[in-house]
Image (cartoon, rainbow, N blue to C red):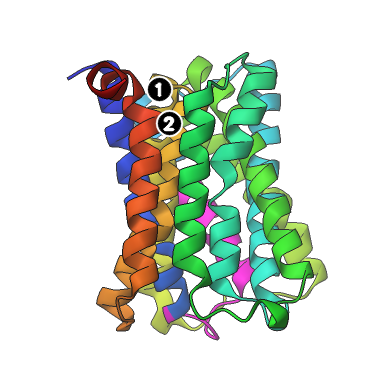
Amino acid sequence: MKKNSFGYLFIVITVIFFSTYEVVSKSIMGRVNPFQINFLRFFIGGSLLLLFLLIKRDVRIDPKSLAVVALAGILNVVFSMNLLQLSLSIPNAKAAIVAVIFSSNPIFVSVFAAIMDKERIPFFKAVGMIFGILGITTISIDGQALGDINILSPVLALMSAVLYGLYTVVGRMASSKIGSLKMNAYSFLIGSIALLPFLLIKDIPVFKFDYSALLQVVYLSVFVTGIAYLTYFMGLTRTGAGSGSVVFFLKPVLASVFAIIFLGEKINLNLVLGTALTLLGMAVMLYWDKIKQKFV
């Protein structure tokens, strides 16, 4: 299997885990504080990855790489993920709209990659992005009363997406040098520790929560955070930040499927049409050369 094929396989695994986040999180609403979830999942996930580093006896990191990793951790854990949680907590916030805005982060990944990594954005990739955005928008707007949306919620979600795009490029820079395992372990721990003062100031419990939600918290920490972020950057180092992150457009599609299976939500025309547009956008972005040979 080619290097890029392995890369996209890793990212697809990531997106499958990421797509379960909303369904699992919804199941523990009211039992665990949203900011506490962020701390727990990144602290536990980072600790698990650090354990692997200790087993490998590979914990050394140079000061320059540590600074880049710390920046990535703070961008992701402290700012991007908390802004995403805040956008969902705004009165009248629509989770579907927040999801579609955050899932646009591959656009910002490509922009930051073009600036920082000198990754050119070809015309066909821009066209594919447009199809992807149309697809996830189509999936998300069904039944949404746009007039009822508090404008602060989408603004916060957009800020989260922008910062996640920057985090992806910064994290990929560190990952390509020191490896995905070490980058994620240290960035998660640094980010969660940096988040700790906020929890204490806001009098949010750190480790105390309704332990009936323990299995979900472990799943979010180990699989959605520890394993999924690891495979994400393993994929990005093989495909490039701009190319690899486009698979993120699958998240709204898969999240809708999981919601149908586990939450009993119904299939509608928007889901079918949006899925088709999303897959078309990904096909254009990932297989343009083969498409051009056959049809152009």
Could you say which disc has been placed on residue 239 in the image? 1
Say which residue appears at 37% left-offset and 32% top-offset: 284
Q: Is residue 259 above or below residue 111?
A: below
Q: Is residue 30 above or below residue 131?
A: below
The N terminus is located in which quarter? top left
Alpha carbon separation for disc pair 1 and 2: 5 Å
> Residue furthest toward the left?
1
Q: Residue 139, how many percent across, how many down?
A: 44, 65
Q: Amino acid at mark 2?
A: Gly
Q: Is residue 31 magenta?
A: yes
Q: Quadrant of residue 206?
A: bottom right
Q: Nearer the viewer, residue 53 or 177?
A: 177
Say which residue appears at 56% left-offset and 72% top-offset: 95
- Badge 1 local density, few (<14 within 10 Å), some, or many (20+)? some
Range covered by the magenta-colored residues = 27-46
User: Which is more N-terminal, label 2 or label 1?
Assistant: 1
Q: Nearer the viewer, residue 97 or 207?
A: 97
Q: Are marks 1 and 2 in contact (CB under 8 Å)?
A: yes
Q: Residue 138, how many percent across, how many down?
A: 47, 63
Q: Residue 116, how many percent across, how many down?
A: 68, 19
User: What type of secondary structure mainly makes up the magenta span?
Assistant: helix
Q: Is 156 positioned to the left or the right of 60 in the image? A: right
Q: Which residue is mark 2?
A: 244
